[in-house]
């Protein structure tokens, strides 16, 4: 074979190889939405569980599920929640302001100035 024929065959082969389709791109996993509300259960460092559900707030012990406090909550701004609650242990009413600083951390301040944090309870 002539040199020009070999070059023509190699060139044609390379051109055809370039026309072959590449594999389909991989699809990315769906983006998981981070929670932006306080709905659900939260736990404090002492193991007390607070529940936020449809405007109702309650706090219970983990061992006996005894109700410690109950009340209501409202969102006063994006990622800010105001809780009006009655402590059944102390028989007192108080107001607590909480900020959702991350999807899993709620920093709170009572009307008397005490501060505490809650962590979203894993499901």
Image (cartoon, helix red, strand yellow):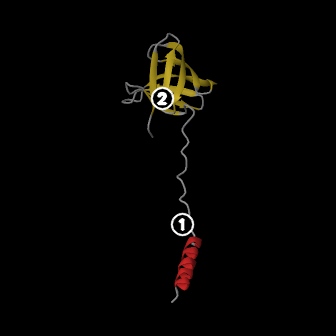
Q: Earlier in the sequence, mark 1 or mark 2?
A: 1
Label 1 crowding class (10 Å Cα cut-off): few <14, some 14-19, many 20+? few
87 or 45, nearer to the observer: 45
Q: Is residue 3 above or below residue 115?
A: below
Q: Residue at x 54, y 80 (%)?
A: 7
Q: Taking 67 as reference, is 1 above or below it?
A: below
Badge 2 is on which residue?
105
Tag of residue 23: 1
Depth check: give the residue in front, 121 or 70. 121
Quadrant into which the C terminus falls? top left
The answer to which quarter of the image holds residue 13 is bottom right
Mark 1: which secondary structure? loop
Residue 5 position within the rendered picture, expressed as x and y whole percent measured from the top left: 55, 85
Q: Using the image, determine if residue 123 lies above or below residue 7.
A: above
Classify residue 62 as left or right of residue 40: left
The residue located at (54%, 31%) in the rendering is 38
Label 2 neighbourhood size at 10 Å, few (<14), some (14-19), many (20+)? some
């Amino acid at each position: 074979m002539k040199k020009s024929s070999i070059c023509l065959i190699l060139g044609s082969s390379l051109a055809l190889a370039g026309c072959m389709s590449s594999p389909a791109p991989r699809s990315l996993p769906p983006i998981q939405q981070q929670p932006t509300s306080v709905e659900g259960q939260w736990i404090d460092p002492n193991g007390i569980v607070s529940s936020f559900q449809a405007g109702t707030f309650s706090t219970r012990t983990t061992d006996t599920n005894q109700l410690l406090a109950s009340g209501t909550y409202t969102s006063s701004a994006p990622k800010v929640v105001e809780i009006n609650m009655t402590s059944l242990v102390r028989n007192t009413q108080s107001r607590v302001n909480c900020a959702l600083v991350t999807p899993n951390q709620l920093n709170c301040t009572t009307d008397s100035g005490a501060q505490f944090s809650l962590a979203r309870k894993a499901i």
